[in-house]
Amino acid sequence: MRAIVFLTQKGGTGKTTLAASLAVAAAQAGERVIALDLDPQASLARWGQRRMAAQVATPIMVEPLERDRLQRLPAILQGLAGAGFTVALFDTAGADGAAVRLVAEAANLCLLPSRPTRLDVEATAATFRAVFLAKRRAAFVLNQCPATYRSSRASHAAKDLTDLGILAEPLLSARMDYQDAIAAGLGVTEYAGQGRAAAEIRALWNWIQAQLAGGKAERHTDQRSARQAAA
């Protein structure tokens, strides 16, 4: 059982949308996936309800997870593994630092989404500190990059995040397929399987698998990262 957690302290980074599409991509790759929604807004849980109503073929379980159950999270994950699940994917509430710490401590990999803006990069750096203190492996996911032209904003944000730690591959573009898919209760690889957004999500899942298999995603890459995380 591998636990993958989406964390951010800033809204609007596409955390829930990425979690939904990544869960589908993992299931299509042969994993048995459960997606757990810790956000009081319950956006991922509502996506799961739309998915059930649509009777989608790709099997994914989507469940809310109440904050008061987080103290038992290691036992919960053990039970899920015993039930045959191979991947647990968490969507979290960004403002709840105590809950973030508990979930991060149980994770095999923390994914920190950021848009290519200064405010997002700064907020993601703050989330990185919490993950560093929990001594967990983490990677930044640069999301909602301009899709139609080469953006200096995206390249600058990528450099800033790489200076902090590991940057996941590939960079993800702002594409309507992501939004249309989640509105329909689908992952983007189901909604437009031959599209560019679907190719990005498959590539991200492949990258995650490689990191988990090789143990390459570290919580920091150098002494500078350690100083920033502990600041």
Image (cartoon, grey):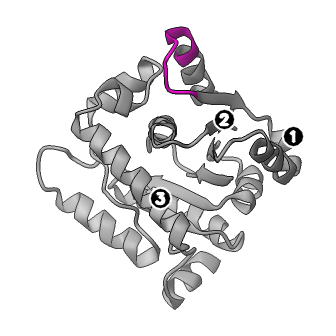
Comes first in the chain, label 1 or label 3: 1
Q: Amino acid at mark 1?
A: Asp
Q: How many marks?
A: 3
- Marks 1 and 3, how far apart in space? 29 Å
Residue 118 in the figure: left or right of residue 112: left
Task: Give whichever of 132, 83 is nearer the camera.
Answer: 83
Percent coordinates x, y for residue 203 in the rendering = 34, 52
Any mark on residue 68, and which?
1
- In what element is the residue under mark 3? helix
Does the magenta segment cover residue 109? Answer: no
Q: Amino acid at mark 3?
A: Ile
Is residue 45 shown above or below 126?
A: above
- Marks 1 and 2, how far apart in space? 13 Å
Of the two numbered discs 1 and 3 in the rendering, the one whose residue sits closer to the viewer: 3
Comes first in the chain, label 3 or label 2: 2
Q: How many neighbours does mark 2 have within 10 angstroms: few (below 14), some (14-19), or many (20 or more)? A: many
- Residue at image position (36%, 60%) is 118
Is residue 25 shown above or below 101?
A: above
- Residue at image position (61%, 51%) is 5
Instruction: Name the residue carrying label 3.
Output: 208
Instruction: Name the residue carrying label 2.
Output: 37
Is residue 15 visible in this depiction of the protein?
A: no
- Marks 3 and 2, how far apart in space? 20 Å
Q: Amino acid at mark 2?
A: Asp
Mark 1–mark 2 CB contact (< 8 Å) = no
- Residue at image position (36%, 71%) is 160
Q: What residue span does the magenta drawing correspond to?
A: 51-59
Q: Where does the C terminus fall, quadrant-wise?
A: bottom right
Comes first in the chain, label 1 or label 2: 2
- Residue at image position (61%, 39%) is 32
Percent coordinates x, y for residue 204 in the rendering = 39, 53
